[in-house]
Amino acid sequence: METWILITLGAAAAQTLRFMLQKQLKTMQLTTAGATFARFIYSSPLVAVIAICYATYSKQGMPDIPAGFWPYAIAGGASQVLATMCVVALFAHRNFAVGITFKKTEVLLSAAFGFIILGDVFTFWAIFAMCIGLAGVLLLSDPPDGVGPWHQRIFNRATALGLGAGLLFGISGNGYRGASLSLGEGDVFYRAIVTLAIVTALQTVAMALWLAWRERGQIMTVLRAWRVAGLVGLTSMLGSICWFTAFTLQNAAYVNAVGQIELLFSLIIGAFVFGEKVSGREWQGLGLLTCSIVLLVLVT
């Protein structure tokens, strides 16, 4: 098994744990932005220390950051913040496993984005896979009670948050890969950890300024919830290191495809930690969306 696959599996496991902890933070008087901020404030100092230690130990020194690095890094960092906020907000509407499944539409949405904006051409089987995915998304977007006009049941806030998270995470992965590869010099882990250190520092500062301006008191609430928030930061750091390294080693689409195993992890967490039950319709949606993603990966 190739190294990047093992690294991606580790990233998916760490990320599932982080979302589980962030869902718990939502019950501790934290807003969506506050729960999102927790992953950055506690992880960025750890990442910075690791980056400095590794650069010193490997004798690669301080990196020479090219101008082309910043657009990729800023786009990746901003889209990741917004995507994480979408996922955390989504947990207030649907259960854990379904929320993560909505997020994993990033593969489908990235393909659609490429077709609309870049004019990418897809085969019949790729289009067929997207249609299966659409059916799965429609099943998942239908509220559990199934009450009300069909257009309100399909076009709702949960659907928008889930699809938004998928698209933003798709942009984020490609942004991070572009930023890491733009460094040019240094080994794979060096480029990945340097990129991660810079991005998380920017994200921490940006979110701190936002909270201080728009949601005063949330920063102190995050600091008071350090027991859970600290674990969010730790799992975020581990997951991010794995994701950044995998994106440096391999195409973001392939990395995201292997990361679909997060669906299985989320089902296990949802059942055994949160005691959630997935309805028959949601099982059908999960199955269709998973088949769609697997088929799309196989034919592209």
Image (spheres, helix red, strand yellow):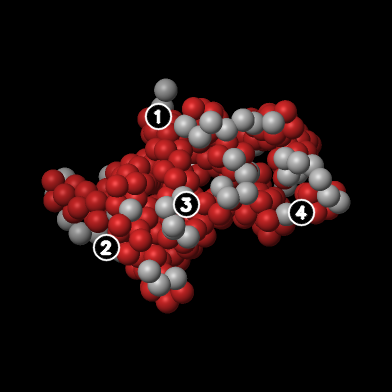
* Mark 1 vs mark 3: in front: 3
Q: Amino acid at mark 3?
A: Lys
10 Å crowding of disc 1: few (<14), some (14-19), many (20+): few
Gap in Å between the C-alphas at discs 2 and 1? 29 Å
Q: CA distance from mark 1 to mark 3?
A: 31 Å
The residue depicted at 24 percent of the width and 51 percent of the height is 46
Query: Disc 3 or 4, which lies upstream in sequence?
Result: 3
Where's the C terminus, which quadrant? top right
Mark sitting on residue 155: 4
Q: CA distance from mark 3 to mark 4?
A: 24 Å
Who is closer to the viewer here, 37 or 10? 37
Tell me the residue that label 2 is attached to: 64
Residue 202 at x, y percent in the picture: 36, 65
| Left-right relation of 59 to 139 | left
**Is label 2 in contact with label 4 (beta carbons under 8 Å)?**
no
Q: Which residue is mark 1?
A: 6
The residue under label 3 is 26
Q: Secondary structure at mark 4?
A: loop
- In the rendered view, would you say 124 is above or below 81? above
Residue at the farthest top position: 1
- The numbered mark, 2 or 3, whose residue comes first in the sequence reads 3
| Residue in the image at 78% along x and 49% along y | 154
- How many neighbours does mark 2 have within 10 angstroms: few (below 14), some (14-19), or many (20 or more)? few
